[in-house]
Image (cartoon, rainbow, N blue to C red):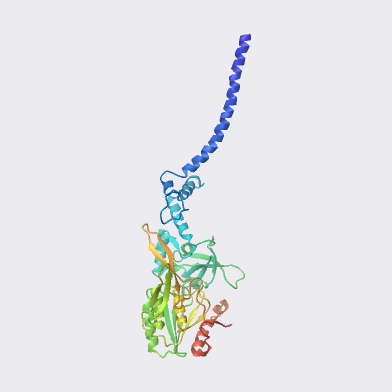
Amino acid sequence: MMDNQSNQSVVKMPWTVVILVTILFVVIAFASGIFLGRQQGIRSAMPAGEGRVLSQGDVPDFLADDVDFRMFWDVWHLVKEIYYEQPVSDKDLYYGAVKGMVAATDDPYTVFFEPQEAESFKSNLDGSFEGIGAEIGLRDDQLQIIAPLPGTPAEKAGLMPGDRILLIDETETAGMTIEEAVMLIRGEADTTVVLTITRDGLDDVLAVPIVRGKITIDSLKWEIDDELQIATISIYTFNGDTNRLFIDAINEISAGDVQGLILDLRSNPGGLLTTAVNVASAWTGYEPVVIEKGMGEEQVFKGTIAPRLASLPTVVLVNGGSASGSEIVAGALQDYGLATVVGTQTFGKGSVQDYRELTDGSAVKITIAQWLTPLGRGINKTGITPDIIVDYTLEDFNAQLDPQKDKAIEVIQHPEIIPAAGSAEETVE
């Protein structure tokens, strides 16, 4: 009996030890598992090869010492491994990284285009596309209408320069780039896009449905009022056909009995620099029209044709939709005292972009310089201040009144009302 009891006690002791050891092992294994799991997570985010693109001790000349690309690959692989909705496209990550890099300049005109976006951008430069026919831009981080082009769905729907776009269909525009907005607004002809806007004078937001159409930009029109003996040249954009149309207008004006000229650049969002310089040359002759100031030496763009219109009393009409090339022309004529500028403050888009296509069909547009008037006044973010400030309200538009053009006619007929250079006169209409 004693032997049996002894045997039983011998049997019980190992099981107790086994249980205790097992519990201890599980605890240790669990703790070790957490640690090893975290360490493995870090290692898996730094694969051999990619994670060693740049080490702390191997910094290329073009990078600052505190830039380490291992973190880039860390984030890349963490997104690929633990983001909840998989798979994540490598190309989407790649394009997103490039867009983020370009966006870090905090310049709304420095952007990266994916291949589809690049194709759309090129079609706009060609002057023919399907959409609503409005130039849009960013001011104070708010997407807004720079200019609805004449005769387009945007103008017919009642959009006006300065309208702030809050929604494109049901997509909020906060944080949206110009190019992203363009991609949403454009579409096939006869389809509808709804822009929810706000503007000064509106008590509430306004939803504006617009039926897209085929947009072909007619860049210039002119007319002569035989009774007033005043000609009007309206330039809507500086495109490839503008030079020819402008010369035709000059020839007709020169052949008639014209005593004054109104150059209407309202809601002209700009276009080709060379075209804007050519137009200004009709007044400035071969003098400097605009100065381009970049990282290196300043580049001066001089006029290209004889000053056939220099002796003709001229008024330039501008508004908040006058941008880029329009501001170059208005600023040059104002600097030389060759025209009186009437209207409201221009948009202030006085920068130069370099556009380059990349190997996969994508492209990048980078701001490389800013424009200055011949007297060295900056245009970018500032714009051109008219010599005579005249508002053009929604009530004027609805009543088919044009107080800005009326003031232009008055200035031509009564040049004594022109204010001294550099002192804007504000009128109440």
Q: Residue 44: percent from the left, percent from the top?
A: 47, 42
For the question of whether residue 401 can be seen, the reply is no
Between 186 and 234, the residue placed more toward the observer is: 234
Tally the marks.
Answer: 0
Going 56% across and 32% down the picture, which residue do you hit?
Answer: 28
For the question of whether residue 234 can be seen, the reply is yes
Q: Residue 155: percent from the left, percent from the top?
A: 49, 73
Q: Quadrant of the N terminus?
A: top right
Q: Quadrant of the C terminus?
A: bottom right
Between 349 and 289, the residue placed more toward the observer is: 289
Picture quadrant of residue 328? bottom left
Q: Residue 295: percent from the left, percent from the top?
A: 42, 67
Going 51% across and 87% down the picture, which residue do you hit?
Answer: 411
In-image side of 361 versus 199 (left or right): left
Q: Is residue 362 above or below residue 397?
A: above
Between 378 and 344, the residue placed more toward the observer is: 378
Picture quadrant of residue 255? bottom left
Picture quadrant of residue 245? bottom left
Going 43% across and 84% down the picture, which residue do you hit?
Answer: 223
Q: Residue 188: percent from the left, percent from the top?
A: 44, 64
